[in-house]
Every structure is written in C-alpha cells, then in structure tokens.
Image (cartoon, coloured by chain):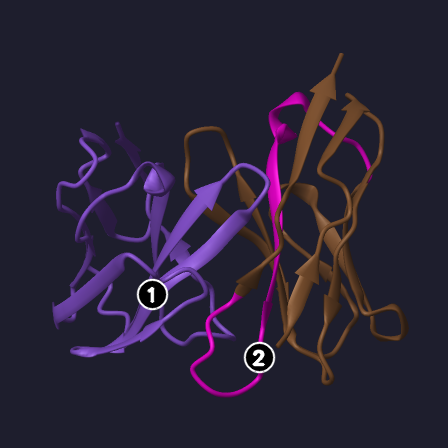
Chain colours: A purple, B brown
Amino acid sequence: DAGITQSPRHKVTETGTPVTLRCHQTENHRYMYWYRQDPGHGLRLIHYSYGVKDTDKGEVSDGYSVSRSKTEDFLLTLESATSSQTSVYFCAISESPMNTEAFFGQGTRLTVV
Amino acid sequence: AQSVTQPDIHITVSEGASLELRCNYSYGATPYLFWYVQSPGQGLQLLLKYFSGDTLVQGIKGFEAEFKRSQSSFNLRKPSVHWSDAAEYFCAVGLPSGNTPLVFGKGTRLSVIA
C-alpha cells in the first residue's frame, strides 16, 4: 500500500471552531489532493498541491484553506467549522495529475455539531 | 470543463451474474479514464485505467472496461460477480495535459445478493 496517513481518522468538533486535518505521505509524490465525500455527490475536490507552497483551489474550496510546507505534508484547515462541512475527507497523492494512479488515504470522518 | 456521469446510483446483482457499470464523459478530446473501487470504510483503490491503444483494458479482481469513443463511454464489466465485489465504484477522467486533477463521477453503489 502507498504510504499515506491521514490524521485524525475521526473527529467531532463544535461549530465555529478551527479544525486542521493532516495528510502525510512517504512516497515523495509531487501532487497531493484533498477531497470530500458526501452521499449523492461522490468525491469533490477541495484543494490540491503541485509542489511545496504551490496550491490551487478545487470546486468546493470555500471555507477551506491548505498549506504545504514540506513535500510529505499537506494540511487542510477549516477556519471556522460549519455543519455543512460534516463529511468524510480523503487525501490523495500522485506523481502527475492525469496519467498516473492516484493513491488514497483511509479518510477522516469529521462531524461538526 | 470535463464532466463524468455515472447514470446508475445503485445496482443490485445476484452473485454469479454478470455486471456492467456505466460511465460517460464529456470532453472534446480523448481523456485518460479510470475506474476506482471503494469498499466500506476504506479509501479508493484503482481497478484499471485507459490512456490509449487497445480499447478493452483488463484490471484487477477480474474487472475489465471498454472505451468507446463514439459513445464517450468507459463501461466497467465483470462476467461473474462475487459477494466481495459489493462496494462503491467511481469512474474518473483526467485531461491529457496540464495540472488539472482527476474529475470523479458520483459513484455507483453495487449490492450483491445470494
């Protein structure tokens, strides 16, 4: 299995609090992604990174920010969590965005109450 | 922008029966095409991919998919389904250039009955 670790795996937080999810890889892949998965919506891209300090927005980036200060770590931050951000969050990595396999982490289940 | 459509939200098949999951994409050129599987509580795993060449591609776990340019489709098939195939299946599309990440369909949930 590709070396991707998401932490935490489960989190319950209160509305209005900041939350940071971490994705750590040991594969030295250039590209890293954050998706959220919701019933009826499949996987939707939040943000992605194509190198250290190089990030871009996905289709559902509002309310989220990311940082990548090292190749191996990609952080997703909810500045002020809302109930609509209750979801399962997946991190993925790939050597290139389109023609190589994307490897996925196990997911983080976030509940905002 | 490219899009991916999986018309079937949920499919139920009997164990041992054949399976076909549909995927249609919208893009001017031929994109890269992928099928992923997600078992309950797990991340996604690549089943197979198509870049070019032979339009029938073989994947893991006995799955295959056929690219049909005229129909903009990339349907996933398996001749005989096993109970362990119950999962959610996602079709994904990648552009042949640039930094654009994969675009995923909304998924098809497969249930297998005895």
Whole-percent x and y of residue B30?
A: 71, 80
Given residues A104 and A111, the one toward you in this image is: A111
Above or below, comparing residue A52 to residue A113 in the picture? below
- Is residue B93 rendered magenta in the image? yes
Q: Secondary structure at mark 2?
A: loop
Specify the segment rendered in magenta: B79-102
Could you tell me if the residues under marks 2 and 1 are in contact, i.e. CB atoms within 8 Å? Answer: no
Farthest residue in the right direction?
A: B70
Quadrant location of residue B81?
top right
Q: Secondary structure at mark 1?
A: strand
Q: Please determine if labels 2 and 1 lie on a single subunit.
A: no
Q: CA distance from mark 2 to mark 1?
A: 17 Å
- Total residue callouts: 2
Whole-percent x and y of residue B87?
A: 59, 32
Chain hosting mark 2: B
- Is residue A46 rendered magenta in the image? no
Look at the image and tell me in which quarter the C terminus of chain A lies. top left
Farthest residue in the top direction?
A: B114
Question: In the image, is A44 to the left or to the right of B29?
Answer: left
**Dot 1 amino acid type:** His
**Dot 2 amino acid type:** Leu
- Classify 10 Å Cα crowding around label 2: few (below 14), some (14-19), many (20 and above): many
| Residue on which the image places disc 1 | A47
Whole-percent x and y of residue B56?
A: 79, 64
- Residue depicted at x 74% and y 79%: B53
Above or below, comparing residue B49 to residue A3 in the picture? below
| Residue on which the image places disc 2 | B95
Whole-percent x and y of residue A93?
A: 34, 62
Chain hosting mark 1: A
